[in-house]
Image (cartoon, grey):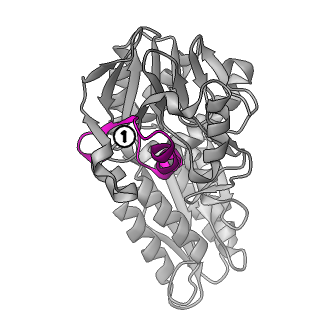
């Protein structure tokens, strides 16, 4: 396997994971890449490594350009193991390499994962190193997406090595956004944002501001394709996703036992349609919760329905709400609904979870015993329409 030249003297030496389909709960139907970058200068530098099982692939790509013992510096922009998994092998094979990470969380994180505290050099925002012809400047981007994250900027090349920020979970044989369909990349970047970065919107907005101050020609993330001439597109998209609260749009998410809650879900959707609100409906038996998150990102309203099973909501709904709460989109309005036979506790439990998300109740919770009548469904639709108008 060969390195791919990104610029003269700069190579992509990462790995392509064609087969990963679940990234800690986030379904990744298009696989991903773990991007590492090699800079040939007076000091030969490797930026990030790859997930451990892909270390040999990275080494093969590096060795297609230069032997491992020539590496002088390894930058660890992020401790999470999809980027640092190859580090123990690299520490062994490059015993003299200086390993640079962030202060204090990078040091703590790498030491906790791999030991060898003595091998790490800590940097903070604004610190820089000279590689010879080029330099690298470090900026902390904590919580994008762990406390240790930092980005590395090369002013002479106008390249930002952005690690998790601006990435996409996409496996392709191409390395640049310009070689594939832009819309496809943006959609995957949006799904990545919604499932990984959304809860750190404030931090993403901060990173945005840092990036705006840089002279750029390229953003080289640690997942997916590299942004070149179209990099403004991803900056614009991040500004929107991290900076704007949606003023319209609705998602209706439900699970159903005997179609009663499903009928209610359709009435809720029809109410939104009647009010001119774009609505997307998801049956959790048919769709994985992570696929729904990009729609939540775009929606003001989140309506969640569950019948009552054994005094509680259905497990699919509980999983969705757990995931949603973790990602904590802000300033949404909610509707909790569902059918029941006798207890009817599920609707209150759903509402409590949506309250815990910090959402505002849009209408009183709606619970209907056994089978919703035509009149009940019409009333539900009318109530939603009146509220959303
Ligand atoms: Fe791609 Fe937070 O690791």
368 part of magenta stretch:
no
Q: Which one is in front, 69 or 220?
A: 69
The residue to which callout 1 is attached is 149
Toward the viewer: 11 or 379? 11
Q: Quadrant of residue 30?
A: top right
The reply, left or right, for residue 244 in relation to residue 316 is: left
> How many other residues sit within 10 Å of disc 1, few (<14), some (14-19) or many (≥20)?
many
The magenta-colored residue range is 76-105
Mark 1 CB near ligand 1 (8 Å cut) = yes
Q: Position of residue 335 (x, y in %)?
A: 48, 60
Is 99 above or below relative to 363? above
Picture coordinates of residue 241 (x, y %)?
A: 46, 34
- 2 sits left or right of 382 in the view: right
Q: Residue at x 63, y 29 (%)?
A: 225
Name the side, left or right, on which 373 lies relative to 230: right
- Rendered view: 118 above or below 121: below
- Residue 80: in magenta span: yes
> Residue 14's x, y, as percent?
61, 35
**In the foreground, 86 or 28:** 86
């Amino acid at each position: 396997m060969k390195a791919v030249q990104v610029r003269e003297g700069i190579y992509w030496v990462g790995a392509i994971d064609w087969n990963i389909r679940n990234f800690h709960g986030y379904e990744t139907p298009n696989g991903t890449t773990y991007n590492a970058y090699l800079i040939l200068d007076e000091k030969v530098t490797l930026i990030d490594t790859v997930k451990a099982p892909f270390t040999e692939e990275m080494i093969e790509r590096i060795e297609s350009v230069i032997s491992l013992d020539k590496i002088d510096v390894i930058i660890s922009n992020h401790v999470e193991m999809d980027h640092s998994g190859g580090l123990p092998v690299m520490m062994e094979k490059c015993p003299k390499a200086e390993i640079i990470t962030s202060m204090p969380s990078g040091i703590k994180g790498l030491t906790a994962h791999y030991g060898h505290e003595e091998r790490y050099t800590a940097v903070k925002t604004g610190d820089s190193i000279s590689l010879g012809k080029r330099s690298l400047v470090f900026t902390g981007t904590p919580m994008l997406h762990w406390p240790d994250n930092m980005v590395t900027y090369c002013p002479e090349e106008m390249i930002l090595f952005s690690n998790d920020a601006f990435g996409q979970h996409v496996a392709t044989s191409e390395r640049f956004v310009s070689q594939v369909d832009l819309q496809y990349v943006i959609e995957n970047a949006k799904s990545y944002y919604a499932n990984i970065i959304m809860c750190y919107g404030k931090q993403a907005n901060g990173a945005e501001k840092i990036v705006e101050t840089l002279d750029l020609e390229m953003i080289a993330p640690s997942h997916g394709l590299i942004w070149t001439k179209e990099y403004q597109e991803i900056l614009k998209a991040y500004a929107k996703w991290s900076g704007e609260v949606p003023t319209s749009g609705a998602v209706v998410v439900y699970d159903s036992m005997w179609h009663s809650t499903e009928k209610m879900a359709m009435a809720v959707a029809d109410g939104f349609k009647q009010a001119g609100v774009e609505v997307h409906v998801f049956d959790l038996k048919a769709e994985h919760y992570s696929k729904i998150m990009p729609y939540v990102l775009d929606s003001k309203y989140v309506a969640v329905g569950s019948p009552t099973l054994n005094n509680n909501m259905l497990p699919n709904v509980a999983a969705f709400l757990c995931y949603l709460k973790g990602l904590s989109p802000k300033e949404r309005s909610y509707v909790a609904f569902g059918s029941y036979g006798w207890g009817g506790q599920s609707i209150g439990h759903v509402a409590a979870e949506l309250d815990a998300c910090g959402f505002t109740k849009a209408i009183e919770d709606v619970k209907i015993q056994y089978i919703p009548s035509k009149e009940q469904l019409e009333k539900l639709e009318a109530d939603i329409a009146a509220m959303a108008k």
